């Protein structure tokens, strides 16, 4: 069995793989091309006519925003989640061009039901607020 990697030697540890989601403010850490998972509220969806079927989705978590690129093939597979999801979990690869970072989606999951659980009336009542 090989010994564990020595972090003091200066080599970075291998990047962890999904399913653990990474917060938006830590997306600068993985190397270009790393496979990561993010989750957040859908702020906007754009399908510009000049983008040849590509959809751009902006997600927001408690730490910031993530720009997600959804190619047409992935859109067709996860159409319902992309169109109707209020909260999404996206796995994909990081693409960096200068200071601009995008996540190229491979898998998309609609997690909107989690929002419904958080916002149940019996949990969050106006009468309980100070």
Image (cartoon, grey):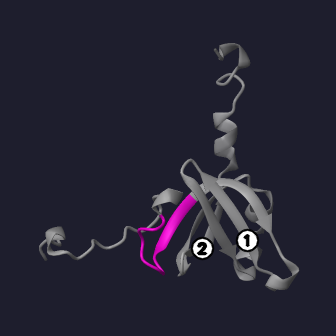
Total labels: the figure holds 2
Tell me where residue 85 appears, x and y as whole percent. 74, 56
Residue assigned mark 2? 102
Q: Furthest residue to the front?
A: 99
Q: Say which of 124 and 117 sits in front.
A: 124
Is residue 28 inside the magenta stretch? yes
Stretch of the chain drawn in magenta: 27-38
The first of marks 1 and 2 along the sequence is 1
Tell me: residue 42, above or below residue 119. below
Q: Are marks 1 and 2 in contact (CB under 8 Å)?
A: no
Tell me: residue 50, above or below residue 12. below
Q: Dividing the picture into quarters, in which one does residue 81 lie? A: bottom right
Local crowd size for mark 1, using a 10 Å CA cut-off: few (<14), some (14–19), many (≥20): many
Residue occupying the point 36% across, 71% down:
15
Residue occupying the point 79% across, 57% down:
84
Local crowd size for mark 2, using a 10 Å CA cut-off: few (<14), some (14–19), many (≥20): some
Secondary structure found at label 1:
strand
Q: Say which of 24 and 91 sits in front.
A: 24
Which quadrant is home to the C terminus? Answer: top right
Is residue 74 inside the magenta stretch? no
3D distance between C-alphas at marks 1 and 2 = 10 Å
**Can residue 22 be seen by looking at this rendering?**
no
Tell me where residue 93 appears, x and y as whole percent. 53, 76
Residue occupying the point 64% across, 35% down:
118
Tell me where residue 22 appears, x and y as whole percent. 47, 59
Tell me where residue 20 appears, x and y as whole percent. 45, 58
Which quadrant is home to the N terminus? Answer: bottom left
Residue occupying the point 70% across, 39% down:
116
Residue assigned mark 1? 56
Q: Which mark is residue 10?
A: none
**Can residue 12 be seen by looking at this rendering?**
yes
Tell me: residue 82, above or below residue 103. above
């Amino acid at each position: 069995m090989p010994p564990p990697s020595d972090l003091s030697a200066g080599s970075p540890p291998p990047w962890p793989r999904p399913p653990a989601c990474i917060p938006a403010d830590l997306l600068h850490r993985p190397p270009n091309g790393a496979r990561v998972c993010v989750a957040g509220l859908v702020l906007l969806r754009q399908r510009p006519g000049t983008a040849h079927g590509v959809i751009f989705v902006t997600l927001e978590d408690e730490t910031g925003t993530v720009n997600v690129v959804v190619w047409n093939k992935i859109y067709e597979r996860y159409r319902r989640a992309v169109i109707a999801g209020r909260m999404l979990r996206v796995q994909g690869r990081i693409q960096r061009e200068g200071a601009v970072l995008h996540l190229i989606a491979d898998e998309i999951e609609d997690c909107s039901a989690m929002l419904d659980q958080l916002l149940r009336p019996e949990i969050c009542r106006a009468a309980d607020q100070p």
